[in-house]
Image (cartoon, rainbow, N blue to C red):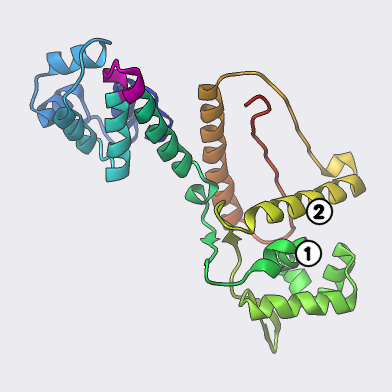
């Protein structure tokens, strides 16, 4: 259970305890959590199932420690406790903004990817501002394209001269290396953080390239989905959190898979009304 998607610290403690019992062992119980907090089981149960009563800051720290939460997760749940406990509107607004910032930072894509984060000191603008450079790099992960770069050029509709320029750029950025046996991959994946100045132009260029490709291929080889719906802010956070879980799954599956073909996946979730 992701603490950063929680809006009720008591509900999180109950669910996290049940999850520990299912996934780890049956020794995770209310009685043992209460003992770790220095209180009795009856009191703990009453607090966790009541809207009026609250654990103290120290008791919540001990409960979170019992569950194995790290310092960042504990900070989040302590702020969440303060938000639920306070009745002052200005103070609650301040705490809510802190929670939103922590949740937003945790829900960045790079937190859920195995790809190496881009080094801010390395000039990778050719890689991110020309979609063909990134595509060529990914295509080279597939053995048949490493052995025959001319087939790669045909697949991407690149001239020999243009492809040669791209390969030179990739070598200069130390993504690939030319050997006696052909090109070798030095870096198979990288991730551009959202705070990079390249992020927005990269996103635009990549999307345009994607749309060009979608227009050229048959519907049988492409699945595209788009929906506009009304909901609330909490629903948006929950949807994003669920997608990031899926992103972790995609990262694990793609890392373990054999490099045979090149795919692309897009997903958008944004506000129209705020």
Of residues 225 and 236, which is closer to you in this image?
236
Is there a contact, CB below 8 Å, between mark 2 and mark 1?
Answer: yes
Residue found 71% across the figure and 77% down from its top = 169
Mark 1 neighbour density, 10 Å: few (under 14) some (14–19) many (20 or more)? many
- Residue 120: x and y in percent read 53, 66
- Residue 170: x and y in percent read 69, 75
The vertical placement of 193 against 40, above or below, is below
Residue found 56% across the figure and 72% down from its top = 122
First in residue order: circle 2 vs circle 1: 1
- Which secondary structure type mostly characterizes the magenta part of the structure? helix
The dot on residue 132 is 1
- Residue 258: x and y in percent read 64, 60
Q: Is residue 88 magenta?
A: yes
**Kind of element beneath mark 1:** helix
Q: What residue did someone put label 2 on?
A: 209
**Kind of element beneath mark 2:** helix
In the displayed structure image, the side of residue 43 where residue 173 appears, left or right: right
Q: Residue furthest bottom?
A: 180
Residue found 70% across the figure and 79% down from its top = 183
The vertical placement of 127 against 195, above or below, is below
Q: Is residue 143 magenta?
A: no
The part of the image, by quadrant, that contains residue 240 is top right
In the displayed structure image, the side of residue 234 where residue 40 appears, left or right: left
């Amino acid at each position: 259970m992701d603490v950063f998607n929680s809006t009720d610290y008591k509900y999180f403690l109950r669910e996290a305890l049940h999850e520990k019992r299912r996934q780890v062992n049956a020794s995770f119980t209310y009685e043992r959590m209460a003992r770790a907090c220095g209180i009795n089981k009856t009191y703990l149960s009453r607090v966790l199932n009541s809207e009026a009563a609250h654990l103290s800051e120290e008791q919540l720290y001990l409960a979170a420690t019992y569950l194995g939460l790290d310092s960042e997760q504990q900070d989040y749940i302590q702020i969440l406790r303060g938000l639920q406990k306070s009745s002052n509107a200005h103070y609650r607004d301040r705490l809510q903004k802190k929670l939103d910032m922590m949740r937003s930072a945790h829900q960045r894509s790079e937190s859920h990817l195995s790809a190496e984060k881009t080094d801010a000191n390395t000039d990778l603008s050719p890689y991110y501002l020309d979609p063909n450079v990134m595509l060529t790099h990914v295509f080279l992960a597939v053995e048949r394209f490493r052995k025959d770069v001319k087939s790669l050029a045909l697949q991407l509709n690149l001239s020999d001269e243009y492809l040669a320029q791209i390969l030179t750029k990739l070598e200069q950025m130390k993504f690939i290396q030319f050997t006696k046996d052909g090109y070798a991959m030095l870096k198979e994946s990288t991730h551009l953080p959202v705070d990079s100045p390249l992020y927005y132009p990269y996103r635009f260029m990549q999307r345009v390239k994607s749309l060009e490709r979608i227009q050229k291929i048959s519907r049988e080889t492409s699945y595209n989905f788009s929906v506009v719906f009304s909901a609330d802010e909490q629903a948006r956070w929950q949807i994003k959190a669920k997608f990031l879980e899926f992103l972790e799954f995609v990262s694990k599956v793609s890392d373990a898979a054999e490099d045979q073909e090149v795919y692309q996946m897009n997903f958008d979730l944004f506000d129209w009304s705020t």
